[in-house]
Image: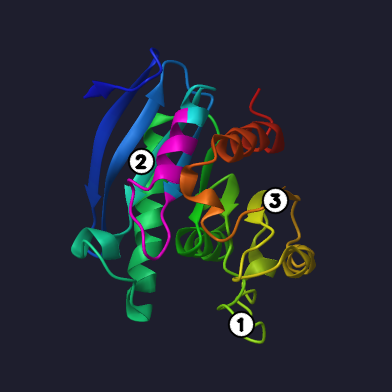
Amino acid sequence: MERDQHADTIELPVEVASPDAAIRGVLHLPSAPVAGLALAHGAGGNADSPMLRLIAEQLAARQVAVLRYNLPYRVKRASGPPHRSAAAADRQGIRLAADVMRERIGGPVLIGGHSYGGRQASMLAAEYPGVADGLVLFSYPLHPPGKPERARTEHLPGVTVPALFIHGDRDPFGSLEELRAALVLLPGHTRLLEVTGTGHDLGSGKKKWVVEEAASAVIDTFGLQ
């Protein structure tokens, strides 16, 4: 156990396994958490990505606990993209992460992540509406780059919880115009935070103002003041 840069927050290692999946990560736990967010990485990343760490630190400073964790495919392999056949296990891993937050946090539990991690979280929320109280989705991959006809939106009408999308205006996985059109498919409350001058990586976590704005949007969208 160690303290992070904020005096009232501790970082706890987390490792959970089920017969079908395992996750491993770090829980940023503030002194009096009002909510929890289980945050997964993108297809080529891991729990230590700069953006995930920065958003975890920003939210923990505002009394929102954040679990940044490796999805099951990343627990098995240190590098490389996920296989399509492993997607169900990855969603089971997200469910494990949500359960961890339910056990530790008394307030609302949010799930989400960057790109692939966020997409799998949204699919889990559509399949199991009670798994979380909201979604936080960074750079949602609407379609493969250059292939808008292959939209990844078929499950969105099943997402009934509030959803916050944080998206760059130069993202090749979906333009802001395309994302706005997709948001009408969700029956619940949605909010889009537009990040100018960034692509799919949202600046790779180097633009601190991006995560500061994202943290404020999480607080405001889900009423966590």
For the point 34% across and 34% down, which residue is it? Answer: 27
Is 188 covered by the magenta stretch?
Answer: no
Q: Looking at the rendering, which quadrant does residue 155 occupy?
A: bottom right
Q: Earlier in the sequence, mark 1 or mark 3?
A: 1
Q: How crowded is mark 1: few (under 14 residues within 10 Å), some or many (20 or more)?
A: few
**Secondary structure under the numbered disc 2 in the rendered image:** helix
Q: Is residue 37 above or below residue 22?
A: above
Picture mark count? 3
Image position, residue 117 (x, y; %): 45, 59
Please name the amino acid that badge 1 sits on: Gly
Image position, residue 79 (x, y; %): 25, 65
Q: Which of marks 2 and 1 is nearer the N terminus?
A: 2
| Residue at which label 3 appears | 196
For the point 24% across and 22% down, which residue is it? Answer: 2
For the C terminus, the quadrant is top right
Separation of residues labelled 1 and 3 (CA atoms): 20 Å
Q: Looking at the rendering, which quadrant does residue 150 occupy?
A: bottom right
For the point 70% across and 67% down, which residue is it? Answer: 175
Q: Give the range drawn in magenta.
A: 40-57
**Secondary structure under the numbered disc 3 in the rendered image:** loop
Give left or right: position of 35 versus 151: left
Give left or right: position of 126 versus 69: right
| Residue at which label 1 appears | 146
Is 50 covered by the magenta stretch?
Answer: yes
